[in-house]
Image (spheres, rainbow, N blue to C red):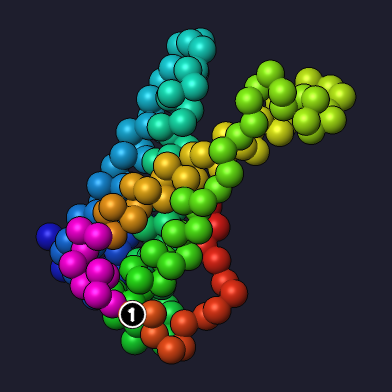
Amino acid sequence: MNNSPQHPATGAPPEGVPASLEAIIAQARHTRQHHLDDIVRRLGRGERLTAEQIYDTLCAQTLCTWWLLVARHIEHADGGRLLPAQAVARFVSWITPYLDDLTPLDPGTAQRALGLSSEHELALAHLDRSLALIRQGAARIFLTQAETFGPARSAEQSPSASTGQEATA
């Protein structure tokens, strides 16, 4: 493992991040980059992208963003005194509500139910619902990964935790 100081703008975990959390962050960054490279390569060859490729890329991007925000919180929140387990616990509490995102309407009834008049409006409505499902899937993965970070399971959110603030993807 690299013990040299790491710049926060690079997205690399700060030095105080435990090895297991650093491994999760590194994996998230690798997965995100793999999917982005795949999309760029396919577009460069003029291929059409599949819904699965787009889903995987957006899910990987969301997960990576959340884990990089955890690392940033460890380094900067509470004057740098925030414990990794507390940072993970905060994000667990902020991300858990994404599990309750509503399931999209049936495509056959969506236009009538939403009263949409154009393909553009209908597409945007479906994209909004699709992005909610992507966040929901990413939330499940994030919470499963957070459980593997032992101390996060028993960590309580610190009294100085900011209420009303949410992590956004």
As helix, strand or loop, the secondary structure at mark 1 comes to loop
Q: Nearer the viewer, residue 102 or 12?
A: 102
Residue at 41 percent of width and 45 percent of height: 138
What residue does disc 1 label?
156
Q: Position of residue 130 (x, y in %)?
A: 57, 34
Residue at 41 percent of width and 20 percent of height: 41
Q: Nearer the viewer, residue 24 or 46?
A: 24
Task: Write the start and end of the magenta stretch as one range.
Answer: 147-155
Q: Nearer the viewer, residue 126 or 75?
A: 126
164 to the left or right of 138? right
Q: Nearer the viewer, residue 54 or 13?
A: 54
Above/below status of 48 relative to 122: above
Residue at 34 percent of width and 86 percent of height: 81
Residue at 51 percent of width and 51 percent of height: 100
Q: Position of residue 156 (x, y in %)?
A: 33, 80
The answer to whether residue 9 of the structure is visible from this angle is: no
The answer to whether residue 71 of the structure is visible from this angle is: yes
Above/below status of 106 relative to 148: above
What is the residue that sits farthest to the left in this orientation? 1
In which quadrant of the rendered view does residue 75 lie? bottom left
Mark 1 residue crowding within 10 angstroms, few (<14) / some (14–19) / many (20+): some
Q: Position of residue 96 (x, y in %)?
A: 44, 59
Q: Amino acid at mark 1?
A: Glu
